[in-house]
Image (cartoon, rainbow, N blue to C red):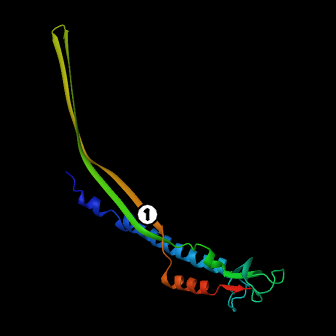
Amino acid sequence: MPNLVPELNSLDFNVYVGGPLQAAIQAQTAASMATVNFIKEVGFESDGNDATVDPLRYVDFQYKKSVPNPDYDPNTAVGPSNQKFIENEVEIKVPFLTTLTIPSIRIDEVNIDFNARLSSTETRDISTEFAASAELGINYKIVNFKASASYKRNTSQGVKVDKTYNLGVKVRAVNDELPEGLSRILDMLEDSIATVA
């Protein structure tokens, strides 16, 4: 019976287990860099000069808003010049980043299932051949007799090891909450929303 321990010891677990983990780390790094690139490309207006700070990109909104008329006098007759509310053009400048969902993918879980199945089969083949022949010849006072026999036996044996490897990797990624620092920056950007009447 063969010893299967050397067969198991010959498996490179750095490849079977470490490979998927390394791929998950690289994927997490790529996801973080994608977030950084998204913020740089979408949130700022680049002028192509690395020596200067790129200005923040804003979205401008304009709408009409009814506001109390400061010149309204209830004792005066109501007319076009003496209305309780007047319409104002309002313009809002909103940082573009605050209107978007910033991608923040995080690998939450990595499951690696590795199964190695080694089965050995011992084979033994035995074959036997026997052959015999005889001749009898009578020739005037001479008797000839010939006999021959042969026997052959072949034996072969061996060990066959069947190897089966199964590798299953399950990765669960979630859209993570924004990091605390980025969340605070977005809160400050929301506070910088300016309304111009």
Kindly tell me whether residue 75 is visible in this rendering.
Answer: yes
Q: Amino acid at mark 1?
A: Val
Q: Residue at x 56, y 77 (%)?
A: 33
Task: Find residue 13 and report its horizontal and vertical position in percent.
Answer: 35, 66
Task: Return the residue at label 1.
Answer: 171
Name the quadrant containing residue 128.
top left
Q: Residue at x 41, y 60 (%)?
A: 169
Quadrant of the drawing holding the C terminus: bottom right
Q: Residue furthest top?
A: 140
Q: Is residue 151 above or below residue 159?
A: above
Tell which of 66 and 39 is nearer to you. Answer: 66
Q: Is residue 17 above or below residue 162?
A: below
- Seen in the image, is 196 located left or right of residue 175? right
Task: Find residue 130 and report its horizontal and vertical position in percent.
Answer: 20, 27
Task: Find residue 122 and report its horizontal and vertical position in percent.
Answer: 23, 45
Q: Residue furthest bottom?
A: 51
Tell which of 81 and 159 is nearer to you. Answer: 81
Task: Find residue 151 and report its horizontal and vertical position in percent.
Answer: 19, 30
Q: Residue furthest right?
A: 80
